[in-house]
């Protein structure tokens, strides 16, 4: 059974940094692209960042480009999102999701999410 | 900037059929956009229903189907049930590794 478990969410002040982790199990991790999607309170879904199965290709939404960095450790079956210079508008539940294949494909499995709150 | 459009809300009777659409403010949706559909109930993580236009995700009932009609991606729920009352989001591939969600459609079953 595929499982994705996010962690690392917290309450932080504007300008601070945070690293989110998505631990996976039940899949051959390197075979699949991975993605981060967020949802601000009461709002819709927003694609944030994606990474290829090898980790060699990364992609970002304009809203986070230059501030967030996605990475993966294929030896640990784990996905990361390093978030710097956090802003109030980054407040959201962050979900990791598994791509249906290694390339640019949509997602089939999701984690339960981790809440990031940015406030002074 | 191209925006992905969805109806804000829809109402369907139990056992009825509802068709949700996913379009673009500029241009037509095609299979090259790899349209996908996600269901979300309040307080829960999204669940994948359909990806690459018409492929049902594992465990999704066959009353959910996806297609492209004219210039939009379409999600059809045939024989709606009470548990289908949810928010539905479509997502399109915009190229260069970038994906964009629509604003979501709130479906009420009554």
Image: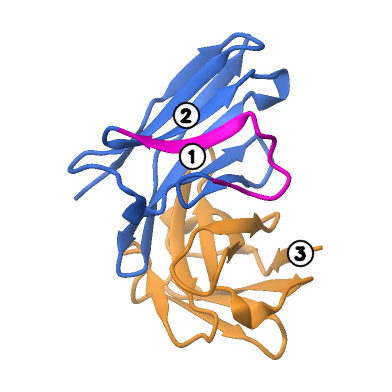
Chain colours: A orange, B blue
Q: What element does badge 1 sit on?
A: strand
Q: Is residue A5 above or below residue B79?
A: below
Q: Are marks 3 and 2 in contact (CB under 8 Å)?
A: no
- Give the mark nearest the N terminus, 2 or 1: 1
The residue that mark 3 highlights is A2
The residue that mark 2 highlights is B105
Residue A19: which disc? none
Q: What element does badge 3 sit on?
A: loop
Q: Nearer the viewer, residue B103 or A15?
A: B103
Dots 2 and 1 on the same chain: yes
Q: Chain of mark 1?
A: B
Q: Chain of mark 2?
A: B
Residue name at image x 69 percent, y 35 percent: B61
Q: Are marks 2 and 1 in contact (CB under 8 Å)?
A: yes
Residue name at image x 19 percent, y 50 percent: B1
Q: Where's residue A98, x and y in %?
A: 61, 65
Quadrant the N terminus of chain A occupies: bottom right
Q: Magenta part of the protein: which range?
A: B55-69
Q: Image quarter for residue B84? A: top right
């Amino acid at each position: 059974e595929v499982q994705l478990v996010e962690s690392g969410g917290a309450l932080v002040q504007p300008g601070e940094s945070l690293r989110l982790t998505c631990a996976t199990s039940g899949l051959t991790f390197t075979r699949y692209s991975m993605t981060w999607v967020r949802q601000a309170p009461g709002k819709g879904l927003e694609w944030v960042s994606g990474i290829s199965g090898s980790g060699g290709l990364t992609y970002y939404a304009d809203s986070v480009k230059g501030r967030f960095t996605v990475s993966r450790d294929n030896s640990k079956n784990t996905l990361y999102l390093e978030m710097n210079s956090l802003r109030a508008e980054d407040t959201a539940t962050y979900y990791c999701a598994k791509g249906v294949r290694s390339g640019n494909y949509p997602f089939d499995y999701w984690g339960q999410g981790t809440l990031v709150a940015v406030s002074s | 900037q191209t925006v992905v459009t969805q109806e804000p809300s829809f109402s369907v009777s139990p056992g009825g059929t509802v068709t949700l659409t996913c379009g673009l403010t500029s241009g037509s949706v095609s299979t090259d956009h790899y349209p996908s559909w996600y269901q979300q109930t309040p307080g829960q993580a999204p669940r994948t229903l359909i990806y690459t236009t018409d492929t049902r995700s594992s465990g999704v009932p066959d009353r959910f189907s996806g297609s492209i009609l004219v210039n939009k991606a379409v999600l059809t729920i045939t024989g709606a049930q009470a548990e289908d009352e949810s928010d539905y989001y479509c997502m399109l591939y915009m190229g260069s590794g970038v994906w964009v969600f629509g604003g979501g459609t709130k479906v009420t079953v009554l």
